[in-house]
Amino acid sequence: MPRRIRINFKNGRDAVVRRLAIGLMALAIPAVTAASEQKRYDVGATDTEIKIGNTMPYSGPASAYGVVGRTAAAYFKKINEEGGINGRRITFISYDDTYSPPKTVEQARKLVESDEVLLLYGSLGTPTNSAIQKYMNSKKVPQLFVGSGATKWNDPKGFPWTMGWQPSYQAEANIYAKYLLSIKPNAKVAVLFQNDDYGKDLLKGLKDGLGAKSAAMIVAEESYETSEPTIDSHIVKLKATGADVFVNMTTPKFAAQAIKKAAEIGWKPLHFLSNVSSSVGTVIKPAGFDNAQDIISAAYLKDVSDPQWKEDAGMKQFLEFMTKHFPEGDKLDFMAAAGYAQAQTMVQVLKQCGDNLTRENIMKQSASLKEFRTEMLLPGIKINTGPNDFAPLSSLQLIRLKGEKWELFGDVISADVSD
């Protein structure tokens, strides 16, 4: 145990010593304060840089989603040109995983162990992110704002380093089911779904929403693999069931094929289309506007093609960004708007982190978003998170295709779903 030293001040000479001791103590106080306010970093962050990693299907069956990564790269470049975040530039390292889970594992390990990124952000896909979720959590590296609506990303107790961003697939399909019951309670429903967690989550949401009537109403369920070149045969098979409602739970490439094939064979059911495939530019236009009339989907972002947003300040900012910073991008592509809004959310979290850029604080700030809005969210939709709520967005509004644009109808619906 260290020896305690006592100083007795008895005479003038000791008074000098006393003043010196007091002065030294005074100097020590700000030193302690400065130490407590010291900048804190984990691997991937410095006084001048924040390294962010990402995987994206720039090629392969889901390559239509690659625009999300390109939009994020353009937005982060814009932020850097404006001085960065709290004086730090973002280094955005994005690799092509071809929508292949083994490739995602390889690229994620490279980002964490070789590139030494601070976090992974916006990596796209349900099967791809599922393949790295345990790895990211074992490494305690944030897997933030996953580009997928699977409910599994909202599990702060089981996976405290993983957080989603968009409304969940189950909640989305649940909304379709409730609407269907209100307008066509005796419908004969045919479902086409992708044979992975994405498709299965949507299917579960639909069945949960239909409740006791699910078994009677769903007359056919067809799954497909992303490795299939075309899903035309599935559409022919579903039409043969006599279904008068088609729930299309596919990704963009296959969604366009389904819309076009249904029109070719004269099948005209009430058609519900998953939100992730609602892009006018990459799905509806290639499928043919005439073939897609009255399709119903759901939205949480403003649609660039909708004239009601022509004078909207947020829409003007987005279009200015696209023109100046991402001119090669398609302004009509829903995925560009999603990538933009998602990147803005990431920037907000980093701003809230201040000079504490530890991975733990990044997760803390990600779980502390309150009433946050980006310019492209529909009115009434806000981002909220908490220590027990890792689902930033949980509201949607139904949309219907009229002419060459989506039209909103009904109210904004809260889409919270518990497993």
Image: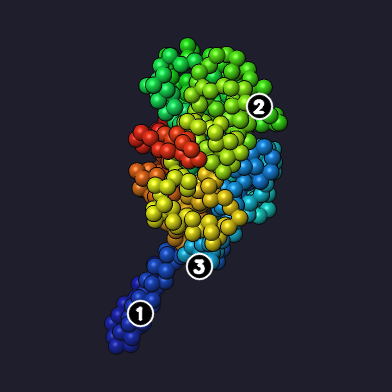
- CA distance separating discs 2 and 1: 81 Å
Residue visible at 67% across and 22% down? 233
Q: How many C-alpha atoms fall within 10 Å of the one at disc 1: few (<14), some, or many (≥20)?
A: few
Residue visible at 65% across and 42% down? 63
The amino acid pointed to by label 3 is Gly
Mark 2 sits on what residue?
231
Question: As drawn, is 122 to the left or to the right of 37?
Answer: right
Q: Element under label 1?
A: helix
Mark before the other along the chain sequence, 3 or 2: 3
Mark 1 sits on what residue?
23
Q: Looking at the picture, tell me which residue is in the foreground, 124 or 193.
A: 193
Mark 3 sits on what residue?
83
Return the residue found at the far bottom. Answer: 12
Residue visible at 52% across and 37% down? 278
- CA distance separating discs 3 and 2: 48 Å
Q: How many C-alpha atoms fall within 10 Å of the one at disc 2: few (<14), some, or many (≥20)?
A: some
> Picture coordinates of residue 158 (x, y %)?
50, 35
> Picture coordinates of residue 122 (x, y %)?
55, 46
Q: Contact, CB < 8 Å: mark 3 with mark 2?
A: no
Q: Is residue 70 visible?
A: yes
Q: Quadrant of the N terminus?
A: bottom left
The amino acid pointed to by label 2 is Ile
Mark before the other along the chain sequence, 2 or 1: 1
> Which mark, by number, is residue 50?
none
Q: Quadrant of the C terminus?
A: top left
Q: Element under label 3?
A: loop
Q: Looking at the picture, tell me which residue is in the foreground, 249 or 129.
A: 249
